[in-house]
Amino acid sequence: MSQPHLRTVVVLAAGEGKRMKSSLPKVLHPLLGRTLLGHVLAAAGPLGADRTVVVVGHGADQVREHLSEVAPGATPVLQERQLGTGHAVRIALDAVPDASGTVVVINGDVPLLRPETVQALVEAHEEAAAAATVLAAEVPDPTGLGRIVRDVQGQLEQIVEERDATPQQRALREINAGIYAFDAARLREALGKLSTDNDQGEEYLTDVFALLRDAGEPVAVHCAADHVETLGCNDRVELAALRGLLRDRVNESWMRTGVSILDPHTTWIDVTVTVERDAVIDQNTQLQGATTVGEGALVGPDTTLVDTVVGAGASIVRSHALGAEVGPQASVGPYAYLRPESRLGRKAKVGTFVETKKASIGDGSKVPHLSYVGDATIGEHSNIGAATVFVNYDGVRKHHTTIGSHARTGADNMFVAPVRVGDGAYTAAGSVITGDVPPGAMAVARGQQRNVEGWVLRKRAGTDAAEAARRAGEGASDTGGAASEGD
């Protein structure tokens, strides 16, 4: 049985990214559920590397903190002065002196890189027993990118940065993608021979290829099937372009699994989201974080879901949900806001202009419109009247309200927590409920109506209201007089 290959991944994430014009390190800028760095780490993950080293520099503390969240097993190594990619790889290997086998080096700003492409590069490198292999791509416009220069036999001669290239070399469209595989021992030896004799005065990792070739070591080129995977990011314009390309890739992938996306150009789905077949995603919809959408569910239009679970056959229209659970066949919206820990049971309803927070709404129960439900439990098949407020905060602490099953609460109710309404109970419209309501009882908590006759004519004389009241009074008198005469 052959022994597994020893592999080390080195991610170069020390650059400042000046053109981003941001206090946030370039590699931490997000797109569709991950940072630039997070996408690169995900692409390298399936290699099953023995160790991953991330070279940090500008914003090192921020990058370290991010790594602790997304890749706690990775080793951050500080490059205090950015003296080039060769220098960065050298200090990375110094941090793992026992590294052997294959060393994979990836720039930290290539978020569209696919795991399959990294795997193919490494396998080609190891099968050829090459000292070094570079990932290349044919691009329509190579401006700003390093070029792959081949000899007359078509073998790699050198990799040249654009600023150091001749006019003939700049005309080449085969570019260096900034992703490499090296034999660890031969890489260490070559790194010790790098010079800074170039336009930038830096140690170029790409010069390793020329050094190895001159020493008679085998070097190789592996071409990516799709150049789009190799696109990097230097400013926010390029970041937006990458975000659009990734959106298209993600949407196409979901549609091919049986998901209907009615307007792919206005639908943004994070790479961390799961969508089951026959779900329908309508226009202007964003699915973010750990959101999952069940089979046959309808989401959108104009909807944002963050870390939200949507059950099979549920419907969410023109709404926003964060950290919520929407049960199977439940309905939400339009214009609803589900805040964290909102839980809707099967066929439950949260309707128009309803906000929920830390609320459990049982199977078949409804909060149809114009209400706030916070810190509450609602049983099964209950109905909450319009314009209801669950008064959960006393200025110091939050308190809980419980509504039983098959209860009916009136419109314009206030439930002043802590309070319980029993199973099958009713509450009258306009009530402020401050005490528990027993099962099956009707709670009426409002002042008795009192009409002060003639108040408008006395207190608002000369107004339109007074004139209207006068005419109405005369009409009533005429009707009453006629009736009396007929008796």
Image: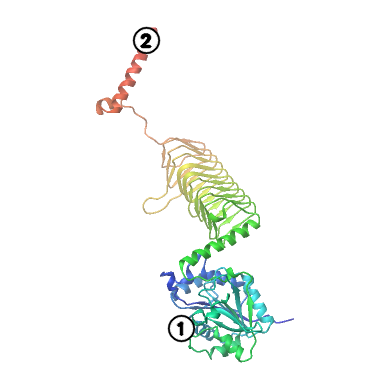
* Residue 33 visible in the current orientation: no
User: If you read the primary sequence from the N terminus, does the residue marked by circle 2 or circle 1 appear first?
Assistant: 1
Q: Mark 2 points at which residue?
A: 484
Q: Which amino acid does label 2 sit on?
A: Ser
* Residue 125 visible in the current orientation: yes
Location of residue 198 in the rendering, given as x and y in whole percent from the top left corner: 48, 86
Point 57% across, 60% down: residue? 248
Provide the secondary structure element on which disc 2 rests.
helix
Q: Do the residues labelled 2 and 1 touch (CB within 8 Å)?
A: no
Point 46% across, 71% down: residue? 26
Height in image: 196 above or below 37? below
Location of residue 23 in the rendering, given as x and y in whole percent from the top left corner: 41, 70
Mark 2: few, some, or many residues within 10 Å (few <14, many ≥20)? few
Q: What residue type is labelled 1?
A: Gln
The answer to which of 487 and 22 lies nearer the viewer is 22
Q: Quadrant of the N terminus?
A: bottom right
Q: Name the residue under label 1.
A: 200
Provide the secondary structure element on which disc 1 rests.
loop
The Cα atoms of the two marked residues, 2 and 1, are separated by: 108 Å
Q: In which quarter of the image is residue 123?
A: bottom right
Point 67% across, 78% down: residue? 124
Is 233 placed left or right of 253 in the picture? left
* For discs 2 and 1, the disc positioned in front in the rendered view: 1
Location of residue 196 in the rendering, given as x and y in whole percent from the top left corner: 48, 88
Height in image: 90 above or below 452? below
Q: In which quarter of the image is the C terminus?
A: top left
Q: In which quarter of the image is residue 6?
A: bottom right
Which residue of the protein is positioned furthest toward the right in this rendering?
1
Q: Quadrant of residue 453?
A: top left
Q: Tell me the tag on residue 360.
A: none
Location of residue 3 in the rendering, given as x and y in whole percent from the top left corner: 70, 82
